């Protein structure tokens, strides 16, 4: 497994034939022009090699409508969106309407993407985290997900076991 930092909250997790792009926000501003990228990514989303997109939550600096609309029509048919199960289904419905396949991730349930690649999604009630296990290694991408107390952390540790790398929110 290889992980590449793309920018802001976006990483690309390479698991052989399967590649998970996390939280792509590469275009424009977020929060009514209140936020902008500190550095514009040098990569075009259509030039990245991936077949899954995982969105941690619907904030525009993670779920970028501008970037999802930029994805070429031919590329869309090979991309599956991974998103936490929600009551309102807004993200799921939007992605399906725009030509993507969607896998809803149930909290704390393993989803096998292939024989060697398994993911687990958890949530703090809004933001979510993603565990990726491949080739005997496990990474945990917390992103903006808040695990605030020891009980929550122990629940995650019991489910995941040892992790090899932790990715979390950072600021300046």
Image (cartoon, rainbow, N blue to C red):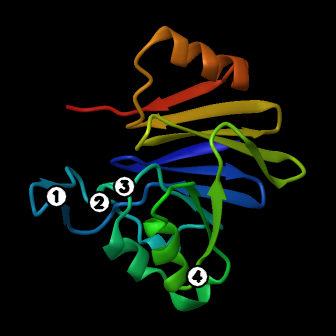
Q: Residues within 10 Å of mark 2 (few under 14, many from 20)?
A: some
Task: Say which residue label 2 marks.
Answer: 60
Q: Position of residue 38 (x, y in %)?
A: 19, 50
Q: What element carries label 4?
A: helix
Contact check, label 3 and label 4, Cβ < 8 Å: no
Is 98 placed above or below 170 here? below
Pick the front one: 151 or 82:
151
User: Quarter of the image containing the N terminus?
Assistant: top right
Residue 136 is left or right of residue 3, and the answer is: right
The tag earlier along the polypeptide, 1 or 2, is 1
Residue 155 is left or right of residue 116, and the answer is: left
Task: Say which residue label 1 marks.
Answer: 31
Q: Where is residue 110 in the image (x, y as percent from the top left)?
A: 76, 42
Pick the front one: 51 or 127:
127
Query: To which quarter of the image does residue 51 belong?
Result: bottom right
Task: Say which residue label 3 marks.
Answer: 62
Q: Residue furthest front?
A: 87
Q: Residues within 10 Å of mark 3 (few under 14, many from 20)?
A: many
Give how far apart the Cα atoms at labels 3 and 2 are. Answer: 5 Å
Contact check, label 3 and label 2, Cβ < 8 Å: yes
Give how far apart the Cα atoms at labels 1 and 2 are. Answer: 7 Å
Q: What element carries label 1?
A: loop
Task: Say which residue label 4 marks.
Answer: 76
Q: Where is residue 164 in the image (x, y as percent from the top left)?
A: 66, 24
For image coordinates 43% across by 68% down, the residue present is: 90
The tag earlier along the polypeptide, 4 or 2, is 2
């Amino acid at each position: 497994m290889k992980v590449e930092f793309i920018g802001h909250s976006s990483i690309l997790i390479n698991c052989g034939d399967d590649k998970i792009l996390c939280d792509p926000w590469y275009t424009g501003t977020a929060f009514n022009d209140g936020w902008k990228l500190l550095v514009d990514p040098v990569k075009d989303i259509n030039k990245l090699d991936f077949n899954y997109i995982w969105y941690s939550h619907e904030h525009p600096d993670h779920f970028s409508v501008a970037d999802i609309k930029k994805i070429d029509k031919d590329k869309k048919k090979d991309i599956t969106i991974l998103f936490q199960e929600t009551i309102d289904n807004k993200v799921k419905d939007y992605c399906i309407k725009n030509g993507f396949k969607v896998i809803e991730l149930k909290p704390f349930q393993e989803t096998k993407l292939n024989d060697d690649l398994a993911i687990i999604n958890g949530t703090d009630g809004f933001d979510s985290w993603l565990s990726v296990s491949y080739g005997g290694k496990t990474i945990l991408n917390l992103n903006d997900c808040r695990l605030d107390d020891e009980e929550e952390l122990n629940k995650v540790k019991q489910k995941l076991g040892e992790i090899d790398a932790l990715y979390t929110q950072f600021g300046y």
